[in-house]
Image (cartoon, helix red, strand yellow):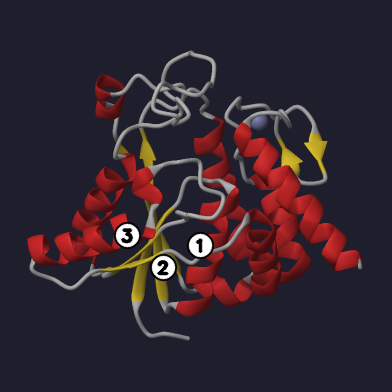
């Protein structure tokens, strides 16, 4: 275990929950930060709280390491974006080939605010669930972008910050596998039952891979990854 302190960008989804478990396994003290930017579905904010309640209860080895949760109000994003996540629009591909769930540069802002919070709280490692592999075309999820941002944050704050992205080179099948390696069947079950990924905010039916509509891009990736991971588990 590392001695350091980490701040996890935590949305209540599968990826950031896996990152939180990863951080709890590797760091002595872990805090979480979420951003409330008028997401269409309050479901995400509820999923955050459900995961934060269940993790320390089900994994006593992580309990003492899990510190404060912070939620920052980012309603300002609603004023600068016209995205399907913040307005009541259908999800589709926009003119640039990016899904219209894209809020331009959102992760840059998230990390900058996380670094400012981390500066105050003594948390110099920032952990995010960005991934190039199941990549929807978001340029602010790229490894190169985040390496440049890490350098900019360290220079601009006069403190050395490290951005850790444990999922960067994993596909969704391997993200399920990482969760299993970190917390076994119990963590996989917690992710299935409590996290939320679906763009439609659908939570009426529990599938083997979790709640969701089953057809939006986020559900499709989550479902495919779980199906492949399960098949390998049973092989
Ligand atoms: Zn969905």
Read off the residue under disc 3. 144
Q: Nearer the viewer, mark 2 or mark 1?
A: 1
Mark 1 / mark 3, whichever is N-terminal: 1
The residue under the point 27% across, 54% down is: 114
The residue under the point 79% across, 31% down is: 205
- Residue 62: percent from left, percent from top: 55, 72
Few, some or many C-alpha atoms within 10 Å of disc 3 (few <14, some 14-19, many ≥20)?
Answer: few
- Residue 147: percent from left, percent from top: 28, 64
Q: Nearer the viewer, residue 162 or 113?
A: 162
The residue under the point 23% across, 60% down is: 148
Say the numbered circle drawn on residue 20. 1
Q: What element carries label 3?
A: helix
Q: Is residue 168 left or right of residue 187?
A: left
Read off the residue under disc 2. 30
Few, some or many C-alpha atoms within 10 Å of disc 1 (few <14, some 14-19, many ≥20)?
Answer: many
Mark 2 / mark 3, whichever is N-terminal: 2
Taking the image in four quarters, ligand 1 sits in the one at: top right
Q: Which of 58 and 111 is in front in this view?
A: 111
């Amino acid at each position: 275990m590392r001695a350091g302190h980490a701040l996890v960008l935590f949305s209540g989804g599968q990826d950031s929950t896996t990152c939180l478990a990863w951080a709890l396994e590797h760091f002595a003290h872990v805090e979480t930060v979420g951003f409330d930017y008028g997401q269409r579905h309050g479901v995400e904010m509820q999923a955050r709280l459900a995961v934060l309640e269940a993790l320390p209860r089900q994994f006593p080895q992580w309990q003492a390491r899990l510190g404060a949760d912070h939620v920052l109000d980012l309603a300002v994003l609603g004023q600068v974006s016209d995205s399907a996540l913040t307005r009541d629009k259908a999800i589709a591909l926009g003119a640039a080939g990016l899904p219209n769930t894209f809020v331009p540069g959102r992760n840059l802002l998230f990390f900058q605010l996380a670094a400012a919070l981390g500066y105050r709280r003594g948390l110099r490692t920032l952990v995010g669930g960005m991934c190039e592999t199941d990549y929807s075309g978001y340029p602010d999820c790229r490894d190169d972008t985040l390496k440049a941002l890490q350098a900019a944050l360290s220079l601009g704050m006069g403190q050395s910050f490290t951005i850790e992205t444990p999922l960067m080179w994993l596909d969704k099948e391997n993200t399920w596998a990482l969760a299993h390696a970190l917390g076994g069947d119990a963590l996989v079950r917690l992710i299935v039952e409590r996290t939320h990924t679906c763009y439609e905010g659908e939570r009426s039916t529990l599938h083997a891979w979790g709640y969701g509509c089953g057809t939006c891009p986020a559900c499709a990736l989550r479902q495919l990854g779980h199906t492949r991971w399960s098949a390998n588990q049973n092989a």
